Image: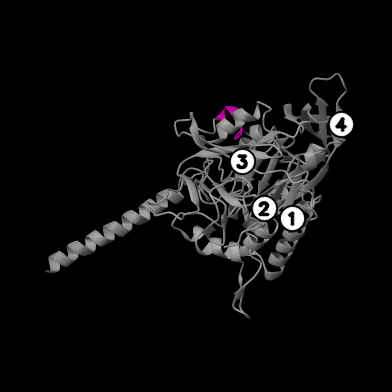
Amino acid sequence: MTRFLVSCISLVLLAVCTLRVSAKAANDANGAPGQMCYADAYNSVQGGWNRTYAPNDPQQIYISLTDDADFARVQFATLGEIKESILQYWPKHSKRKSVTIQGQDWEFVDGGIAQRKLYLHKLKTKALKPATVYQYKVGSKSNSSATWSPSYEFHTAPKKNDFSFIATGDVGACNAVAVPHMKDLAKTHKFDFVTLAGDQAYNLDDFNGTKGDEYLNFMQDLYAQVPYLGAVGNHEGAYNFSHYKNRFNSVPFAESKFDNSLMYSINYKSLHLVSFSTEVYFTGTTEEIKTAVNWLDADLAEANKHRHTRPWIIFLTHHPIYCSVNSSDCSTKAATIKNGPVDPATNLTWGGLEDILLKHKVDIYMSGHVHNYERTYPVSKGNLVTKSYHNAPSFFQIVIGNAGQPEGPTQFGDGPFPAWSAKRYGSFGFSTFRVTPTTMNIVHHQANVDGTLGGVIDQFTVSKDLPKNNNTKRDVCVV
């Protein structure tokens, strides 16, 4: 009997140790939070993302936009303090001389033990011509000499109302399965910007911020050519989101009447895009939640005044409120965001997102965080509203958290799944949108682990009848 008990205890201990080793292995994946990121099949060193930079070398270059690409902002970093930052840009197919802009420069100090310094530089173009391909380069000036970056290209908004963009989320520098394909798309000038639904680098602050440097250098071939319009995620939360606020300081938050880059919106042709931080529900104070919700309500109220010219509203954030993975992200955390926190004095919820989205007739809720792809039907208060995407009476949600990050994709269970869950895919990919005033064609592309681009995982069209004026209303069905 004693020998039997010893054997049983040994088996239990072996199982516990195996589970611990498995968990440790997942946490120790190449590039996982707290782990170094080394070259792999998806982040070829040919791009030079992990090379050694001199103090004056421009690096981590990315571009962002203001409304309808009337202006662009370019941001870059240097490891050393410089005298002056410079942007030169010129129309690619024109004999016009280049325009030279001087930048805004500041020192960013990482919150880690080394208090490492990084020097950031932001530059804004003058008014840009529509439907134009521009080339540009950035320079860092010390004394009388300047060190220049390679030249990059971007294009401004087309004169017609049709346009396309790339949508992705949850990207590391390691195991970034979909990123090479998006970099290829960046060269085509077919996509006007890229949205990213939060969580980058895993994490930007690791190793006194050097991991964030490597990640942004790895993403430079995408972000320097297709303007960045992303959202913040929980993996950017260190030191009060200071890395995100500084490194992504060029998104149009000031034009959107917010204090920092955690919240902003932009008008682009027939689209109003809102970037919102759902992190406020988990890390924010009561006052910060109220500030965020009030800003969102006011922003969407203004957007609704212009639905006759900008009929589409996409809400971009990190955490989903509808998803069907068996985890707290799709249950308790989703409920907190959807309904808001509980007021201890009344035991009632307040400040939730769903009522605001329904009130202002938002079309799409786009998120990441869960590392897979899932599309819902139009949904409200936990119930399927309709399976039609034409003149839908409520928003639907897309989870696009599967671009590729160290831990790998999140698998779905065996079900049963909620009636509102329309499509599920548990591996790597990214989405593209084609937008007109009356339709949005949305495609989710498969990215294979062998490095090849797979087929189409999901493709569908959202449509609506264009309102005649801004008094035209769309009923909201709340069930």
**Magenta stretch bounds:** 45-51
Across and down, in percent, residue 467 comes to 74, 46
**What kind of residue is marked 4?**
Thr
Query: Which quarter of the figure has residue 131?
Result: top right
Q: CA distance from mark 4 to mark 1?
A: 36 Å
Packing grade of label 4 (10 A; few <14, some 14-19, many >=20) is: some
Name the residue furthest left: 1
Q: Are marks 1 and 2 in contact (CB under 8 Å)?
A: yes
Disc 2 on helix, strand or loop?
Answer: loop
Q: Which one is earlier in the sequence, the residue at label 1 or at label 2?
A: 1
Residue named by callout 1: 300
Q: Which mark is residue 100?
A: 4
Q: Which mark is residue 362?
A: 2
**Which residue is located at x 63 percent, y 55 percent?**
112
Packing grade of label 1 (10 A; few <14, some 14-19, many >=20) is: many
**Which residue is located at x 84 percent, y 30 percent?**
129
Q: CA distance from mark 4 to mark 2?
A: 40 Å
**What kind of residue is marked 3?**
Ala
Across and down, in percent, residue 119 comes to 75, 44
Mark 4 or 1, which is nearer the eye? 1
Q: Which one is earlier in the sequence, the residue at label 4 or at label 2?
A: 4
220 lies left or right of 146: left
Residue 40 visible (yes or no): no
Q: Which one is earlier in the sequence, the residue at label 3 or at label 1?
A: 3
As rendered, which of 380 and 412 lies closer to the eye?
380
Mark 4 or 2, which is nearer the eye? 2
**Which residue is located at x 67 percent, y 68 percent?**
285
**What kind of residue is marked 1?**
Leu
